[in-house]
Amino acid sequence: MQKRTFTDQMGRVISLNYPPKRIISLVPSQTEFLFDLGLDEEVIGITKFCIHPNDKFKSKTKVGGTKKLNLEKIRSLNPDLIIGNKEENEQSQMEELMNEFPVWMSDILVLEDSVEMIKQVGILTGHAEEAELIASTIINSFADLQSVSADNLKTAYFIWKDPYMLAGKNTFIDNILAKAGFANSLTMNRYPVVSLEQLEELGPEVIFLSSEPYPFKDEHAQEMKSKFPNSKVLIVDGELFSWYGSRLLHTPDYLRSLIKQVNCHS
């Protein structure tokens, strides 16, 4: 093995034994991507939220949640690479790990960032060719999506209940909505708490209730429909809007089907 240096998406330079043989992944979407690269043996630790693929979830050591890591468990696994994310992991815990292990961090706001992450992690793990194929397929699939559009329908995307929280500007979800031609009703940044009275003033034509992190169900959709009778209300697959790894391979087709559903409701 040889020592090599890499720069992560936060501009940090890390040095590690290449290729890494003991990897811990702290983000569900990136964990799934690592397995899709074929790193079944190399990935030794994941979070309790890294549920895909299911057989790997069952067999791999869990190191806590994305924001509540079990640092002692991580240390006991003695990783030669930890892969995290600026938004999904807790800063102080990550900084503690950075003092002890090579930690590569992603920082993802738009689709192009995720494609770059895919390519860089491929190089980082010695699977550049496989990663390049995934990245180019995602790019081409989203390019094909331009042939259909939601025609800038004003859209509200709910991620939480009690209180209601929505995806605002400067979020990955906002960027994915835009790729399909949905116009985010919110002008606020990140994930603001919004009352239904405030939302009424914004007048969304489409309301999406995400399956995660809050598990919105049909009963919630019916309740929302009663409050917004002029809006199209749909439960949507949150993973296909917010997971920024290889799951993006399936997102364009899903967005295409959503556009059709919305148009059918028109």
Image: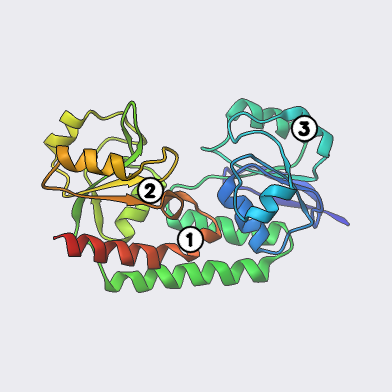
Q: Say which label, 1 or 3, has the lower sequence index.
A: 3
Q: Earlier in the sequence, mark 3 or mark 2?
A: 3
Relative to 10, 253 lies left or right: left
Q: In the image, is 129 to the left or to the right of 164?
A: right
- Crowding at mark 1 (Cα within 10 Å: few <14, some 14-19, many 20+): many
Quadrant hosting residue 69: top right
Up/down of 131 relative to 5, above or below: below
Residue bearing mark 2 = 173
The residue labelled by disc 1 is 248
List x then y, in percent, for residue 120. Answer: 62, 58
* Relative image position of residue 191 (x, y in whole percent): 36, 34
Q: In the image, what residue type sits under mark 2?
A: Ile
Q: Position of residue 251 (x, y in %)?
A: 42, 62
Quote the CA–CA distance across marks 1 and 2. Answer: 12 Å
Q: Which residue is mark 3?
A: 73
Crowding near pointer 2: few (<14 within 10 Å), some, many (20+)? many
Viewer-closest of 202 and 139 = 202
Residue found 31% across the figure and 31% down from its top: 164
Quadrant showing the N terminus:
bottom right
- Residue 199 sits in quarter: top left
Amino acid type, mark 3: Lys
Cα distance in 3D space between marks 3 and 2: 32 Å
